[in-house]
Image (spheres, rainbow, N blue to C red):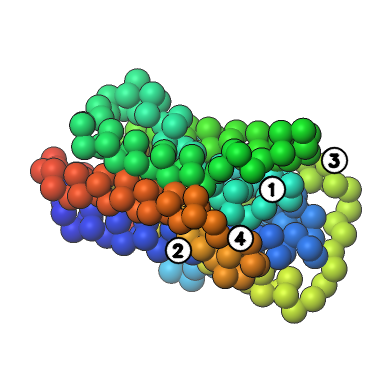
Amino acid sequence: MSNKREFTAYLLLGAVVLLWGVNWPIMKIGLAYISPMWFALARVFLGGACIFAILAWQGRLHLPARRDLPIVITVGVLQIAVLLALLHTGVRYVDAGRSAVLSYTTPLWIGPLALVFLRERLSGRKLAGLALGLAGIAFLFDPTVFNFSDTTGLMGNAILILAAIVLAVVIVHVRAHPWPISALELLPWQMALGAMLLLPVTFMMEGPPKVVFSPALAAVLVYNGPVASAFCLWAYLTVMRNLPAMSTAMGSLGVPAVGIFFSVLLMGEPLPASKIAGLALIAMGVLVVTLVDLGKPREPALPEKQ
């Protein structure tokens, strides 16, 4: 992999961390006007429409080849339909900061998967970075203040942890899949598949849409469609295919850190010393893993079609 491609992947990962992190309190605001599943469906539809329009305008819209169907199914079913449904449901019952933390416990689950399916071995420095990041998660989660008698809260936490496991499976498959075409050209079909699956499930779970129209909801949907869905999904797929699976998962720990910060800033959620310590540990863990990757020589990668 060329240093330039790796550097670009890290830039995209930084953009995703910022934009998805900001989106946690934004989603919490949106849920005051629209139910979780309809919110998820709306953002997939708007994001997919943007990607379809861009590719059609560029003359690059075409059906996926048979060899790409497995990755279309994995991303469309797991990352778009299942993951978004879990995230939007979980954040309804859990505060935005804790939701961001639980849904990005992915490094806990991705290590064994990457070892078995990708033969990615963890160096001592990567293990140290992982330990720092997971210690940060422990501080951010702060189980000492959690009410374990709250069954609704427990359900919300379990849903978000399941979302993290689903994301780990997606990262490993995307990393293992050969990509003769760009991630952008497959994304509209992945989003279309996700939307088709979300639609009947949404009707079954929530019935007809109940939406309170407002300028705030319009702003939330505008952000969640073109930005948090279309751009960020493309960028994250690009990151997943160009960086080691554990590096992608560790870098993604920045999302809850940013989510915590903006939840405090926009929604007035408390910021105790435990959260500050957690943010610092996550930042150190991500930095350690990033420096290990950037300092490691790479084998040449196959050229990617743009």
**Foreground residue among 49 and 284:** 284
Q: Secondary structure at mark 1?
A: loop
Amino acid at circle 3: Met
Disc 2 vs disc 1: which is toward the camera? 1
**Cα distance between the residues tagged 4 and 3:** 36 Å
All told, the count of numbered labels is 4
Q: Secondary structure at mark 3?
A: helix
Residue annotated with mark 1: 94
Q: Taking 236 as reference, is 33 left or right?
A: right
Residue annotated with mark 2: 18
Residue annotated with mark 4: 270
Residue 58 seen: yes
**Cα distance between the residues tagged 3 and 1:** 23 Å
Disc 4 residue crowd, few under 14, some 14–19, many 20+, Cα 10 Å: few
Tell me which label, 4 or 3, sits earlier in the chain: 3
Residue annotated with mark 3: 204
Amino acid at circle 1: Val
Disc 3 residue crowd, few under 14, some 14–19, many 20+, Cα 10 Å: few
**Cα distance between the residues tagged 1 and 4:** 14 Å
Q: Quadrant of residue 245?
A: top left
Q: Taking 268 as reference, is 181 left or right?
A: left
Tell me which label, 2 or 1, sits earlier in the chain: 2
Question: Which residue shows up at 64% across the image and 67% down it?
Answer: 268
Question: Which residue shows up at 63% across the image and 55% down it?
Answer: 96
**Cα distance between the residues tagged 2 and 4:** 20 Å
Disc 4 vs disc 3: which is toward the camera? 4
| 142 in relation to 54, above or below | above
Q: Where does the image place residue 13, in percent across and percent down from the top left?
A: 37, 56
